[in-house]
Image: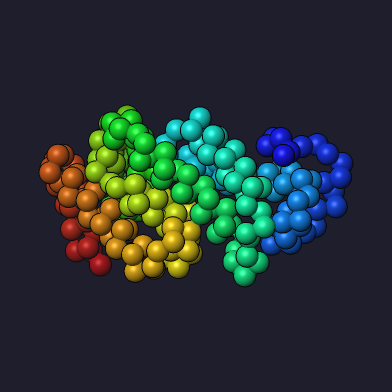
């Protein structure tokens, strides 16, 4: 089995003009140079995805390594009818969910919630900006423990990665309606917990929203 590291192999040049789908079809034949090219292309995006799902950079690196290992081991299972990204994201996301389930909730990190909280809760940036960054991080770290592993994964794929509900459903092996339900539940949970635990911030956000709505 080839080493799962970036390669400077000059033979990779022949793969640079291939589409992702074509590259995976070559990979299915057992060409380890195709794996090298796949690692070069996809490591960055997969690392970002894994980090947002699990909230820890070292764990994310492990997940990326395992993703490529699984892709190599199951290379013949790739179906060219499906998007290469969907196939790889499904492997990485499932590995991330498995890792989250093995953790105690107190170790879960809040980065995807913190970074995209404004978008998630339909809040105004000006309101959240009143909080110190450190305080926002602390609060949302606490709130994020209320999300299930599936809700967190759906949130990252749908809101952070910007994938369509149908593609998220394909990645997670569920229906698009289930994706929408998870996303709705995540938003509702975070808004509820913000209001319950930190009513002063929720009130300020609501006042800001009311003021802007009245000006329309």
* Residue 206 can be seen, yes or no: yes
Q: Is residue 7 left or right of residue 209?
A: right
- The residue positioned 48% from the left and 53% from the top of the image is 161
- The residue positioned 74% from the left and 43% from the top of the image is 36
Q: Is residue 209 left or right of residue 82?
A: left
Foreground: 48 or 10?
10
**Which image quadrant is residue 67 in?**
top right
Quadrant where the N terminus sits is: top right
Q: Is residue 75 left or right of residue 183?
A: right
- The residue positioned 57% from the left and 40% from the top of the image is 66
Foreground: 204 or 86?
86
Which scheme is used to colour this image of the protein? rainbow
Residue 171: x and y in percent read: 48, 59
Foreground: 137 or 19?
19
Q: How many marks?
A: 0
Residue 205: x and y in percent read: 21, 49
Residue 82: x and y in percent read: 59, 66
Q: Is residue 163 left or right of residue 139?
A: right
* Residue 137 can be seen, yes or no: no
Residue 183: x and y in percent read: 32, 58
Quadrant where the C terminus sits is: bottom left
Residue 48, placed above or below residue 30? above
- The residue positioned 22% from the left and 63% from the top of the image is 213
């Amino acid at each position: 089995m080839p080493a799962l590291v970036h390669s400077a192999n000059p033979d990779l040049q022949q793969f640079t003009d291939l589409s992702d789908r074509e590259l995976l079809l070559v990979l299915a034949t057992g060409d380890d140079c195709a794996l090298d090219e796949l690692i070069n292309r996809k490591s960055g995006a997969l690392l970002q995805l894994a980090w947002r799902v699990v909230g820890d950079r070292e764990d994310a690196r492990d997940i990326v390594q395992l993703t490529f290992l699984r892709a190599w081991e199951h290379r013949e299972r790739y179906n060219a009818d499906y998007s290469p990204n969907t196939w790889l994201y499904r492997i990485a996301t499932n590995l991330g969910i498995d890792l989250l389930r093995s953790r105690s909730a107190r170790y879960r990190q809040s980065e995807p919630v913190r970074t995209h909280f404004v978008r998630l809760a339909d809040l105004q940036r000006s309101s959240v900006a009143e909080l110190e960054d450190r305080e926002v991080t602390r609060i949302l770290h606490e709130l994020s423990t209320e999300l299930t592993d599936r809700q967190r994964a759906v949130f990252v794929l749908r809101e952070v990665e910007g994938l369509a509900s149908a593609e998220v459903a394909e990645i997670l092996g569920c229906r698009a309606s289930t994706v929408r339900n998870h996303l709705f539940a995540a938003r509702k949970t975070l808004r509820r917990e913000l209001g319950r635990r930190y009513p002063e911030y929720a009130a300020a956000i609501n006042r800001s929203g009311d003021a802007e709505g009245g000006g329309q």
